[in-house]
Amino acid sequence: MNERSKPPAQQAQMVESAATRTKKPNNKPAKLTREVQARLGQQLRAMYEQVVNQGVPERFAELINRIDAKEDKDRQP
């Protein structure tokens, strides 16, 4: 019987056992150095810069304005 033909519960148990075998006790979470964090930040900004520069579509801006106006109206006595 290969692994794919085993019942899902047995497959999950096999995955859990593999995960536990590779887990080291009292592992501290991995920490990134400031240099690595800075580099990741630069790369993310570069990737999403175009999206950010597109701005909010007019349709969304109108919806936001309508919601804000309704909230302002609801706050007034």
Image: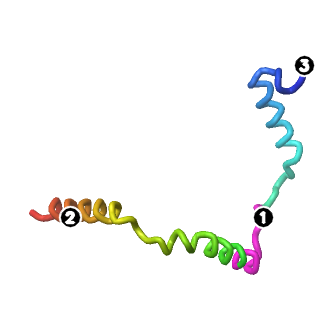
Q: Are marks 3 and 1 in contact (CB under 8 Å)?
A: no
Which of label 3 and label 1 is nearer to you? Answer: 3
For numbered disc 2, what is the local secondary structure? helix
- What's the residue type where badge 2 is placed? Ala
In front: 41, or 63? 63
Q: Earlier in the sequence, mark 2 or mark 3?
A: 3
Task: Kindly identify the residue that appears in the image at 19 percent across and 65 percent down.
Answer: 72
Quadrant in which the C terminus is drawn: bottom left
- Residue 27: which quarter of the image? bottom right
- What's the residue type where badge 3 is placed? Met
From mark 2 to mark 3, how far is it between C-alphas? 64 Å
Give the residues in magenta: 29-38
Q: Earlier in the sequence, mark 1 or mark 2?
A: 1
Mark seen at residue 69:
2
Label 1 sits on residue: 30
Q: Position of residue 42 (x, y in %)?
A: 67, 77
The answer to whether 1 appears left or right of 60 in the picture is right
- Label 2 crowding class (10 Å Cα cut-off): few <14, some 14-19, many 20+? few
Q: Position of residue 52 (x, y in %)?
A: 50, 72
For numbered disc 3, what is the local secondary structure? loop
From mark 1 to mark 2, how far is it between C-alphas? 46 Å
Label 3 sits on residue: 1
- Residue 37: which quarter of the image? bottom right
Which of label 1 and label 2 is nearer to you? Answer: 2
From mark 3 to mark 1, how far is it between C-alphas? 38 Å
Q: Is residue 37 magenta?
A: yes
Q: Position of residue 14 (x, y in %)?
A: 83, 32
